[in-house]
Image (cartoon, rainbow, N blue to C red):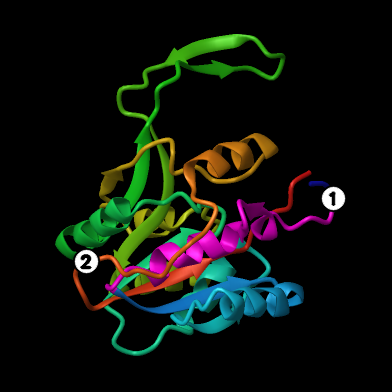
């Protein structure tokens, strides 16, 4: 790993990270369509993964934009008519569980939204510019947000249309919905739904995931669409 290495193509066992991630949604019977949002210069590499690992639900490979919200918007605009529930997921979270996918879908159906989040276990300190502790932040209401983040189609479209029109900056999809003044519901997740960001994360994910992948479908409610986001930084 190093400069110029795209972490999504690093292998866990015998399989690239992105293939592990895509297969989780490929195996979900509720998922009918996957839009894969990628960098323009990596399109061919992603096409090769979908071909080699038979990810048949990837119907479109969409080119991302200058910033995260532009990339998400490009993916949303490319969704087919009739989409019901949209899940937005980081390509670098290959350890997402079937149960978590299902729970976010159910929450979105019931409340309009359902985002994966994990309770903060560590003590949180506020620190000044000189590295001195200012205060201890109460953690009982603090959650670390993950993906997938699931929404009713009309809600997430309104949210991102508003973001684009206002030229706002949001760091996740829930923030876009919050900007509308709409409530966002969380679905409790676990730290094992990690995002592969460092070499240490790669080692942990290698323990959690099988060396090989299969395409046996799981049973979850039907009529759901998935939009995958795979614009990721390389390891430094």
Residue holding disc 1: 3
Rendered view: 60 above or below 190: below
Q: Is residue 162 visible?
A: no
- Estimate the x, y position of residue 44 in percent, counting from the top left: 71, 80
Q: Write the residue at 59% across / 45% down.
A: 196
Query: Circle 2 is placed at which residue position?
Result: 220
Q: Give whichever of 50, 118 is nearer the camera.
A: 50
Q: Please tell me how crowded label 1 is: few (under 14), some (14-19), or many (20+) other residues with Cα within 10 Å.
A: few
Closest to the camera, between mark 2 and mark 1, is 2
Residue 172, numbered label: none
Q: Is residue 127 above or below residue 114?
A: above
In this picture, is 136 found above or below 149? Answer: above
From the viewer's side, name the closer residue of 95 and 230.
Answer: 95
The answer to whether residue 35 is magenta is no
Q: Position of residue 80 (x, y in %)?
A: 39, 88
* Circle 2 SS class: loop
Magenta range is 4-30
Tell me whether the residue at label 2 lies in contact with that at label 1, contact meaning CB atoms closer than 8 angstroms: no
Extreme residue toward the left, this view:
110
Give the image quarter of residue 83.
bottom left
Residue at 22% in and 66% down: 220
Please rate how many residues cluster around mark 2, counting C-alpha atoms within 10 Å: few if below 14, some from 14 to 19, many from 20.
some
- Residue 9 spot, x, y in % from top left: 68, 60
Residue 26 painted magenta: yes
Q: Residue at x 46, y 60 (%)?
A: 89
* Residue drawn at 26 percent across, 58 percent down: 102
* Cα gap from disc 2 to disc 1, whole angstroms: 40 Å
Of callouts 2 and 1, which one flags the residue occurring earlier in the amino acid sequence?
1
Counting labels gives: 2
Q: Is residue 216 left or right of residue 92?
A: left
Query: The C terminus lies in which quarter of the figure?
Result: top right
């Amino acid at each position: 790993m190093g400069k110029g290495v795209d972490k999504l193509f690093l292998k866990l066992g015998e399989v690239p990270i992105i293939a592990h991630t895509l297969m989780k949604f490929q195996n979900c019977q509720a998922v009918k369509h996957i839009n894969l949002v990628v960098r323009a210069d990596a399109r061919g590499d992603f096409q090769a993964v979908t071909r080699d690992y038979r990810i048949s639900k990837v119907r479109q490979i969409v080119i991302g934009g200058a910033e995260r919200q532009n990339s998400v918007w490009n993916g949303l605009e490319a969704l087919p008519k009739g989409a019901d529930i949209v899940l937005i997921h980081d390509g670098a979270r290959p350890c997402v569980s079937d149960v978590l996918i299902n729970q976010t879908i159910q929450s979105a159906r019931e409340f309009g939204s359902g985002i994966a989040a994990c309770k903060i276990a560590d003590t949180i300190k506020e620190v000044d510019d000189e590295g001195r502790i200012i205060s201890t932040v109460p953690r009982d209401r603090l959650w670390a947000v993950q993906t997938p983040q699931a929404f009713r189609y009309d809600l997430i479209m309104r949210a991102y249309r508003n973001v684009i029109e206002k030229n706002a900056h949001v760091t996740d999809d829930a923030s876009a919905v919050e900007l509308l003044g709409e409530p966002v519901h969380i679905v409790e997740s676990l730290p094992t739904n990690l995002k592969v960001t460092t070499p240490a994360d790669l080692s942990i994910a290698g323990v959690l995931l099988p060396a090989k992948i299969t395409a046996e479908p799981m049973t979850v409610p039907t009529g759901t669409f998935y939009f995958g986001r795979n614009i990721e930084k390389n390891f430094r």
